[in-house]
Amino acid sequence: MARLAAFASFILLAFPFAANAAPSSLSPPANTLSPYTAVTAGDFVAGCKLDHSSCAAMVGQVLMNRIQFWPTSHICLPGVSYADGVETWLAAHPETAAMQAHDGIFLALSTLYHCGEPNNY
């Protein structure tokens, strides 16, 4: 038993580590904020500031995922640059920051581009 204790002491001294520390290779880099990895609408807005093209792609993805559900049929898109207004709208409505990113994006789309006045396209 004494040998086992001595061996354990040797291992702990030779290879010190924190018992609850995760390996550094599992820790994500600090700059991984992206529209694709955003959990909340606030994260999405922050990610869009770093990667505008992914922001537009994510808005399109959310629209395509929800196209079959009501009230999507009441969205009148102004043209191919419809994604441009979503980040601005979300940033101007801080009450949406804690929403799920996809829900916030869809809310912005359905609010900005609701068919009828002024969006009679």
Image (cartoon, helix red, strand yellow):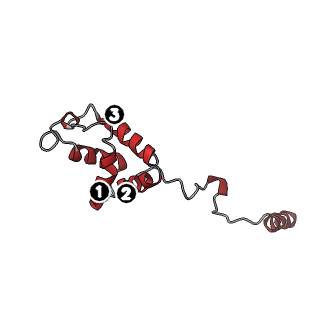
The residue that mark 2 highlights is: 42
Q: What element carries label 3?
A: helix
Callout 3 amino acid? Met
Q: Position of residue 11 (x, y in %)?
A: 81, 63
The residue under the point 36% across, 38% down is 60
**Dot 3 surroundings within 10 Å: few (below 14), some, or many (20 or more)?**
few
In this rendering, position of residue 120 left or right of residue 9: left
| Figure quadrant of residue 36 | top left
The residue under the point 78% across, 66% down is 12
Q: Can residue 69 be seen in this view?
A: yes
The Cα–Cα distance between marks 3 and 1, rounded to whole angstroms, is 21 Å
In this rendering, position of residue 95 left or right of residue 52: left
Q: Can residue 71 be seen in this view?
A: no
Question: Mark 3 touching mark 2, by CB under 8 A?
Answer: no
Q: Is mark 1 on a helix, strand or loop?
A: helix
Q: Position of residue 118 (x, y in %)?
A: 14, 44
Give the camera-side residue of 97 and 48: 48
Q: In which quarter of the image is the N terminus?
A: bottom right
Indicate whether 19 appears above or below 36: below
Q: Which of marks 3 and 1 is nearer the N terminus?
A: 3
Callout 2 amino acid? Gly
The Cα–Cα distance between marks 3 and 2, rounded to whole angstroms, is 21 Å
Question: Mark 2 touching mark 1, by CB under 8 A?
Answer: yes
The residue that mark 3 highlights is: 64
Callout 1 amino acid? Thr
Q: Position of residue 104 (x, y in %)?
A: 31, 50
